Amino acid sequence: MSATIPLKVKNMPDGGTIGGGVKAIGYEILSHLEKLRSSGEAAAIDMRSLPMAPEEYQGLMDMLGQGELDLTIEIDGPTHVRETAYAGVWWIQHKDRHDQVLSEYIEINHVPEFLSAQDDQITAAIDILGERLKGAS
């Protein structure tokens, strides 16, 4: 016997609906945005760890909307980075070469962390560029 969990649905001004789970995630994102603004603290919500029905998943995508950036990067499979309609809220999905989702999360940050150059990468760039310039005529 399977149990069902009642879900109260609220009407949105645009005629759509936001379910209770979607609204809860929305408030979590709002809280993370406030922390980002006040302290610079970034956060991420692991979408694969959340028990969501397909309708809730789509409802969350609809609620967050589409921002100006929507790009795909090849990192041992496609990584899709989508800016939402809310500055600082990014929807990121990593897939393998067989198009299977490896990870998916909503990152609350100025720029997605994995796009930022890391200290060791910058150190290597300094060394390589310095050596190249020394050898340049």
Image: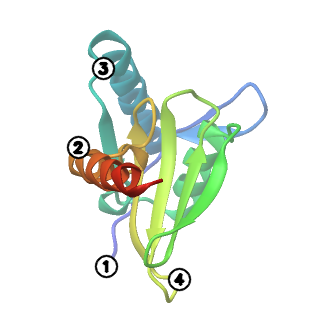
| First-in-chain label (3 vs 4) | 3
Mark 3 or mark 1, which has the lower sequence index?
A: 1
Whichever of callouts 4 and 2 sits on the residue coming sooner in the sequence is 4
Q: Earlier in the sequence, mark 1 or mark 2?
A: 1
- Callout 1 secondary element: loop
Residue at the outermost right position: 14
Which of pointers 3 and 2 indicates the residue nearer the eye?
2
Q: Which residue is mark 2?
A: 119
Question: Relative to 33, does residue 3 appear above or below in the rendering?
Answer: below
Please identify, in this view, whether the residue under mark 1 or under mark 4 is nearer the observer: 4
Q: Secondary structure at mark 2?
A: helix
Amino acid found under the numbered disc labelled 2: Asp
Q: How many marks?
A: 4
Does dot 4 land on a helix, a strand or a loop? loop
Q: Which residue is more in the foreground, 87 or 110?
A: 110
**Residue 13 locus on image (x, y percent):** 74, 24
Mark 4 or 2: in front is 2
Q: CA distance from mark 1 to mark 2?
A: 54 Å
User: Which residue does the numbered mark 4 point to in the structure image?
Assistant: 99
Whole-percent x, y for residue 109 in the image: 40, 32
Where, by quadrant of the figure, is residue 135 drawn? bottom left
Extreme-bottom residue of the structure: 98
* Of the two numbered discs 1 and 2 in the rendering, the one whose residue sits closer to the viewer: 2
Above/below status of 76 relative to 39: below
Q: Residue at x 53, y 53 (%)?
A: 56
**Residue at label 3?**
40
